[in-house]
Image (cartoon, rainbow, N blue to C red):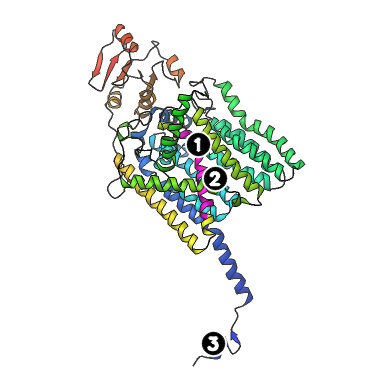
Amino acid sequence: MIEPALASTTETGPIEPPIAATDQAQENVTRHRQHWPYLVVFLAMVWIAVVRVPLILNAQIHLDSDLAVDGLTLGEAVQGHWRWHYPATPHIGIPPVLYSLPQALIWGANPFTLVSGGTVAYIGLVLATFALTRIAFGRTAAVWGLVPLTFASTGAIWLSGRITGGHLSAVLCHAIAFLLLYLALTRSGLKYAIALGVWCGFGVYVDSMFLLTLSGLVPAAIWAWWRMGRSRRGLLAALVFIPAFLVGVAPREIGARVDPHNAYPQGFLSSFDTAVLINHIRLLGLDCLPRLITGHRLPDLQSDPSPSELGDPGPNNSPRDTSPLALAVTVVVLVMFLAAIRALADPSSTRGDHAANAIRWGLLISGAATLFAFVIYREIFNPDNYRYLVDILVLWSVGFGLAMRSLVQMGRAGLAIAVLCGATMAGLMTLDTGRWYHQFGWVNSVGQPKRVPLDDPVLAWLDAHPDVDSFLTGYWDAYRLTFLSDRPVRGIPYPVYPNRFPEWSRALPKGHPQIVIARRFQRGGAFVERAFQSGGQFLERNNRFYIISWP
């Protein structure tokens, strides 16, 4: 028999819990609902870092000369030499060195600490995009938007191993700029307009690619001001934006005057030649955009770079991929990408919210500008140029989040479809990434990371000859060998290539380096002849390279 004091019911019905207990329970549920997205973000960050461990462990293998310049600049920063911008590139500011600097201060400036900075930059991009989507489109869209960035293509993973060459700083600034735009449109006061102006100027300083962001952000801001009543406050915000922008961009102008040497003075060169445009459209549609989104080029599903070309300038000879997995990844992810674009372009996704609508249109316009600039840019040559499309990653994430949000709003059936889509993408991309790493030998059969030792006889020769402190060679060897060497040495590229450290050439005691290193694919031509005419002799010679003294 149940005692009356212990009974859970009375003759009139269930005993109601105390009001305070009910409020506490509801508060706990609310707090849980508010905090769980941040747990998802944390898990995404962990996964992103874990997936990139093989890329970091094998930094020596895939390091090329452009990335080596970033490493040499990192080494200077560790020693206290701070630049305004990266060597010989005034269009790329120095702040990206901060991604790797804390690690380098602890473990030294080496390929591993250098490449780890790319993972830091990518995590920053994920956090900024999540914050943008969360505040402009809601929690559900933000959580689902994590999927394409967390389970990214091998193309996106490869970019996160390049500090300046991956242009992740540009896309990180891109996401934060649109976040600040939303705040400036929805919050009172001018502090967000000032912050937006400073940040946009800073974005141009960090990477000139940020101009593509402004191509969408500025018209979106004007459109929102017009639709929201053409207020005087909006005009005042525009007025304070301009001087704030000048403050943010000032380091770029200062750096260009303090260190004006530019190894790439041509800047953005356009071409409207029909044959060039057709070729660029082909590269865009079949090579670069598919590589960024799916990791595979069309129609042969190549996955770049080729294992034989690690450390070389861009992919050109990757083999055709006949794997069913490659086909599944490409088809499924491209379909989801198209769904994401449609969701972002759907006016019903932001009906009645002028600020969110401005973000949506701003992302679409800047995305279109990115594609247009790619097509008309004269310096587009191969699939490696997909890095200029990196801003599309934000559009991809936000659009995917909106697409899944619309499914979830349909009820249980829609939720089931969304879960299936997310799980399918996560599974396919994880398997494809593992297979991609495996072709390099960077993971074993069960997916555990492996470090492959670097086998470069030219580097070994340099390290075995401490009397040599300078050498002349092709660009793609000069800075790579300099950074990888276990002692101070200066590699100078042939004069036909960009010279990123001209002060090295000016400091040579005899006006030229001590030796010439000529690879099979870049023999050195006239410079080899000049070395021989000065009494040079072969120091090392085989069918892959030769080394000549230059007295």
Residue 37, compared with residue 94, is above or below; it is: below
Pointer 1: what residue? 98
Query: Which residue appears farthest toward the front when viewing the image?
Result: 274
Marks 3 and 2: which is nearer the front?
A: 2
Q: Secondary structure beneath disc 2? A: helix
| Location of residue 191 in the rendering, given as x and y in whole percent from the top left corner | 69, 42
Q: Which quadrant would the C terminus be assigned to in this image?
A: top left
Picture quadrant where residue 490 is located: top left
Residue at which label 2 appears = 128
Q: Residues within 10 Å of mark 2 (few under 14, many from 20)?
A: many
Residue to which mark 3 is pinned: 7
Magenta stretch containing residue 391, yes or no? yes
Q: Name the one closer to the observer, 237 or 18.
A: 237
Residue placed farthest to the right in the image?
Answer: 232
In depth, the one of 56 and 311 nearer the eye is 311
Q: Is residue 298 above or below residue 463?
A: below
What secondary structure is found at the residue carrying circle 1? helix
x, y percent for residue 280: 45, 29
Amino acid type at image mark 2: Ala
The span shown in magenta is 386-404
Amino acid type of the residue that numbered disc 1 sits on in the rendered structure: Leu
